[in-house]
Amino acid sequence: MESNSVKGQMADDVLLEVNNLKKFFPIRKGFLKKTVGNVRAVDDVSFFIKEGETLSLVGESGCGKTTTSRCVLRAIDPTEGEILFRRDDRTVVDVAKASRSTLKPLRRQMQMIFQDPFSSLNPRMTLLDIVGEPLKVNGVGRQERVDRVAELLRLVGLRPEFLRRYPHAFSGGQRQRIGIARALALNPRLIVADEPVSALDVSVQAQILNLLLELQEDLKLTYLFVAHDLSVVKHISDRVAVMYVGQMVEMAETDALFNSPKHPYTSALLSAIPQPDPRIRAQRVIPLGEVANPANPPSGCYFHPRCPYAQDICKTDAPIWEQIESGHYVRCHRARELELPGIMALEEKA
């Protein structure tokens, strides 16, 4: 029997560890579709998630957040790197290299909540079929499926008698609750939430976020939360990882990252968070130029053409991913010397 276990490479409290993950998409041109380059969608990304915590991936659109999350689930195959996952029997498997026979039982433990609650639900299927589909695939009988779907609908705040209805009968927030119920059907341990509230009204976002937090506490879930809204991230995250042009540039506990960022890109993102306080007369947003092209990234540090603190070394030498304080990782030559404004400092200055 094939063994995919990896021994002695993860701390006991870590559920998922990603090491040097890369995903390149080929650029093909001409009649023969010859490969002339690559889009470096994910370029040497490393992070870990402890059991029961929430790690958020943030960054501008196109920075590689969703591609990273889909590689973690092996929805797409990575180009290089390790994706170590601790199964419920405590053994560790490298998802990136796992065979199809190994992946099938793993998928029960790793599930995804999709961004758009309107396109992620089949309009021709009832809630019983949508939420119960993972159960059916795994051989659960019909009556047991009906009972389990009713239980899941109650769990996410919907009435169990809704299971005969179709998605068109529900609002956006209710549809996202259905998507959450589907993700919970097989009692997973890791939930990858790909911008689960970005398509919802602001009034509904808080309800869904609070539901996710309640479910995490009740079911001992671990979240990889993909988002671009830092105000949402601050509410739900234990730790935050910032991505830029396929690379991880900073990762730290939420309060540390928001109050004392070590990378200029993180500080610029924080300055763009809207401030609802009417006493703040003019918000000071740190200006940045155009984002780099992942198909042709700059030399040295990818961020240096937009960085107000860039020096000559930033243009020629790529910075390494390193831990500069306890639990605080950054990819920047000047991380130890710069004093960058966090969210509190920006509020005070404004």
Image (tube, rainbow, N blue to C red):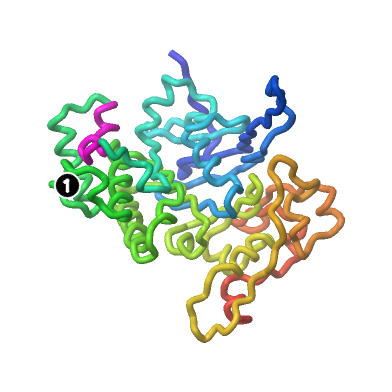
**Quadrant position of the C terminus in the picture:** bottom right
Is 259 above or below relative to 165?
Answer: below
**Quadrant position of the N terminus in the picture:** top left
Residue 249, image x, y percentages = 65, 52
Residue 297, image x, y percentages = 74, 45
Task: Tell me where residue 265 sits by quadrant.
Answer: bottom right
Residue 189, image x, y percentages = 37, 41
Q: Residue at x 22, y 45 (%)?
A: 152
The span shown in magenta is: 125-137
For this view, does 259 lie left or right of residue 32?
left
Q: Nearer the viewer, residue 68 or 251?
A: 68
Tag count = 1
User: Within the magenta stretch, is there residue 134?
Assistant: yes
User: Within the magenta stretch, is there residue 169?
Assistant: no
Q: Which residue is mark 1?
A: 162
Is 105 above or below relative to 276?
Answer: above
Q: Residue at x 71, y 50 (%)?
A: 292
Residue 52, image x, y percentages = 40, 49
**Dominant secondary structure, magenta:** helix
Q: Residue furthest top?
A: 1
For this view, does 72 lie left or right of residue 60?
left
Q: Amino acid at mark 1?
A: Phe
Q: Circle 1 — which element?
A: helix
